[in-house]
Amino acid sequence: MKIAVYIKDRSVHGDAAFSNMDFRNPQLGNPGIGGTGYEYMLLVYALTKFSDAEVNLYCYEASNLYPDGVNVHVLHDNADIVSQVKADGSDLLVLTANESLGFYDIYERAKEQNLKLIAWSHNYMSHHMLKRLADSPAVKRVVMVSHEHYDCYLDHKIIKKSTYINNMFDGSRLMLRDYPSEPAVTYTGGLYPAKGFHVLASMWKDILLEVPDAKLYVIGSGKLYDKNAVLGAYGLADEQYEASFMQYLTENGEILPSVKFLGNLGAEKSEVYYITTAAVVNPTGASETFCISALDAQACGVPVVTRAINGLFETVKHGVTGYLGRNPEEIKNYIILLLKDKQLNIKLGRQAKDFAGKSFLPEVIVKQWLKLFDDVINDRPCEYIPPSEFRNYGHKRLKIANRWLHEHHIPTPAVSVLSGSASAFIKSISPRLHAALKKLLKR
């Protein structure tokens, strides 16, 4: 089996998204790049370490160091990638599901040269992107990174060629922290609106009223995805976004003594978790299809607090490894609870360590990738995966209903369901189908 992997290690401006990085042992932790790039490195590592597959990696930056055993091909642009992959004799190409015109060109050239593609989706996709992927004969599979991510599209035609494989994470190497000597909250993530740091910042002074000696450690910056990004006066994030959260964390222009900004950290972030009482990741949850940062903290025995939505259901177990709040007030109260209740914190921390340390190991997850590759190479059909939970967020139950209606050949435009008028439509169908659909949605 000969697998080609294409990683876009350039920003949208053509600059290096990451360079001079050491990816030879990504299982030891993220060296300080975005989650998508890190997962590509873990996949390449796992294929070379735990399989007999030959791996060809196509990238732009020659300065990075990659896992032993991978064949690295440095590109000048993406115009020749399909012909290069074909010339190298690879069976298929794994690449990111990306909306740039360059990627659409790759889809077209792959169709012309009969190259099989696997589009790996780490983010939520627009209707335009879904249509392009669904209609491309070269794209044989679209891989989501969690079951909740996959369920977002279960009533769209993209699901006919989609599956999900959880992201890889090796937490087995990390130690269980001792209970911290002082109450400390650690946020990890890029300082961008989609990652929700402003929500935590807005509640910090309220947390200090309940726990006056609490500390806030902030891991991440506005340069996580673009090293050349222009930052605001404090050097933390885009000027406008920086102002939106620093209003809560300053007095007379000075950063509060309880707040420490640590910038982008690699594997050394574990040293911060070892002195952390509670971790917070993306308190909006808006962009989270999985959330590796949640696993990073939990693997050190730190309970995580975040939003009850999207892929966070996969990586934080409510009341077991941390808490999933339904709104900012609940999130704040859960943080305060973990800062005050030592025994509860220790219990959840141990359970978090057990969960995050074992559930997503590369040597386990790579087996699913190898089966997927074998299925694609041998043109096996894609199997539909039913929802594991009927959670009521993001129109999920309505999407389930919409799919059910189509499966039963009951004509209804998807918009009638997704716009919230499903109940009127359901009542208009036959009593037998009405009862069956109501039963389905009560699962």
Image (cartoon, rainbow, N blue to C red):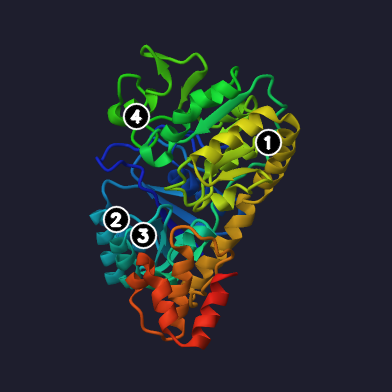
- Does 331 sit left or right of 117 as displayed? right
The tag on residue 244 is 4
Residue 349 seen in the current view? yes
- Residue at left 37%, top 70%? 421
Q: Cα distance, mark 4 to mark 2?
A: 29 Å
- Residue at left 41%, top 83%? 428
- N-terminal label among 1 and 4: 4
The tag on residue 99 is 2
Specify the quadrant of the image occupied by residue 388: bottom right
Q: Position of residue 409 (x, y in %)?
A: 42, 86
Q: Cα distance, mark 1 to mark 3?
A: 43 Å
* Amino acid marked by disc 1: Gly
Mark 4: few, some, or many residues within 10 Å (few <14, many ≥20)? Answer: some
- N-terminal label among 4 and 2: 2
The residue under label 3 is 85
- N-terminal label among 3 and 2: 3
Q: Cα distance, mark 3 to mark 2?
A: 21 Å
- Residue at left 51%, top 60%? 392
Residue 228 seen in the current view? no
Instruction: Please say if the residues under marks 1 and 2 sit with CB atoms less than 8 Å apart.
Output: no
Q: Position of residue 333 (x, y in %)?
A: 58, 35
Q: Cα distance, mark 4 to mark 3?
A: 46 Å
Q: Nearer the viewer, mark 3 or mark 2?
A: 2
Seen in the picture, residue 155 relative to 346 is either above or below; the reply is below
